[in-house]
Image: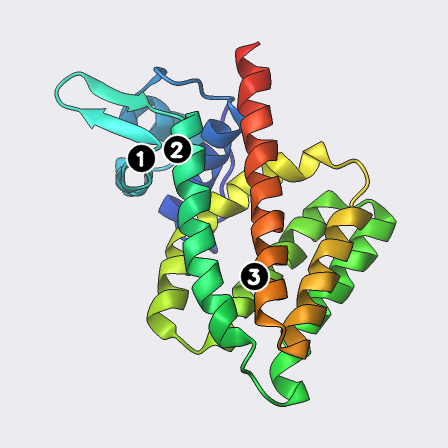
């Protein structure tokens, strides 16, 4: 079946996103073999965007290019998930420690709106809208940190964490608890309670990691 892509966005980025989500969701199993020709036909694009996607997904360690044998899906292992979330924890704790110094209500408007959108999405049971607001909340922590290189690293891994979140969020039929966690984190950040904020963030990321590990275990059972 042909996979439609939108012409207004980089074709390589669109192909990358679709394939990334398939791999993270387990729709493309570890060991599956991909071909440029097959992907180009499926997405109705030339091989250029396919090669762009392969390069990016290879960087993310989700696929492996084995010349001359072909392209193989690596997928996510327990160790991969542990590494990704330990990396995110280290990055975000540093961002958090700087973000709590931000002064002025205007600096906090964007992250506050993200919390409000999460609450509204929880009320509506709208998981996709919650994912968007959740990622915006965490992106705003990096923006508040005023550390462009740190924010750059976060944005580099943001597509991977977006795909992970789209999987883990579906473990929560009721999104209100997660929305409340973000509200609490915002509250302790605004109050400048650094140790409490760090503890809340650790618990939040540990919960996300555990849900992803549970997902992987379910796939193997």
In the rendered view, does 174 fall on the left or right side of 194?
right
Depth check, front residue: 36 or 79:
79
Count the marks: how many?
3
First along the sequence among labels 1 and 2: 1
* On screen, residue 147 above or below 120: below
Seen at 49% across and 46% down, the residue is 161
Is disc 1 in contact with disc 2, using a CB cutoff of under 8 Å? yes
Q: CA distance from mark 1 to mark 3?
A: 29 Å
* Vertical arrangement, residue 158 with respect to residue 150, above or below: above
CA gap, disc 1 and disc 2: 9 Å
* Mark earlier in primary sequence (2, 3): 2
- At 63% across and 90% down in the image, what residue appears? 104
Between residue 47 and residue 214, name the one nearer to us.
214
Q: Position of residue 111 (x, y in %)?
A: 64, 71
Q: Residue at x 33, y 69 (%)?
A: 149
Image position, residue 137 (x, y; %): 61, 63
Q: Nearer the viewer, mark 1 or mark 3?
A: 3
Q: In this figure, which residue is indicated by the disc labeled 2?
A: 80
* Quarter of the view holding residue 68: top left
Apparent side of residue 153 relative to residue 51 in the rendered image (left or right): right
| Distance between the alpha carbons at the discs numbered 2 and 3 | 23 Å
- List the single residue furthest toward the top: 221
Residue located beneath label 1 in the image: 61
């Amino acid at each position: 079946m042909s996979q439609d892509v939108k012409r207004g966005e980089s074709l390589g980025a669109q192909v990358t996103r679709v394939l990334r989500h398939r791999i993270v969701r387990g729709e493309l199993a570890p060991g599956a073999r991909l071909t440029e020709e097959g992907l180009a036909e499926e997405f109705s694009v030339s091989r250029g965007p396919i090669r762009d996607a392969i390069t990016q997904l290879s960087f993310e360690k989700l696929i492996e290019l084995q010349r001359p044998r072909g392209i193989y899906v690596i997928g996510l292992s327990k160790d991969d998930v542990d590494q990704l979330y330990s990396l995110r924890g280290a990055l975000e704790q540093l961002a958090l420690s700087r973000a709590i110094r931000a002064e002025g209500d205007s600096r906090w408007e964007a992250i506050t709106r993200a919390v409000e959108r999460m609450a509204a999405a929880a009320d509506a049971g709208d998981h996709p809208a919650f994912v968007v607001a959740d990622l915006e909340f965490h992106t705003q922590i990096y923006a508040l940190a005023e550390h462009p290189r740190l924010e750059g690293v976060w944005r580099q891994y943001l597509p991977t964490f977006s795909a992970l979140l789209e999987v883990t969020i579906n473990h929560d039929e009721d999104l209100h608890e997660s929305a409340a966690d973000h509200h609490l984190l915002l509250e302790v950040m605004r109050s400048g309670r650094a140790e409490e904020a760090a503890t809340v963030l650790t618990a939040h990321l540990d919960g996300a990691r555990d849900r992803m590990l549970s997902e992987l275990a379910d796939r193997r059972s």
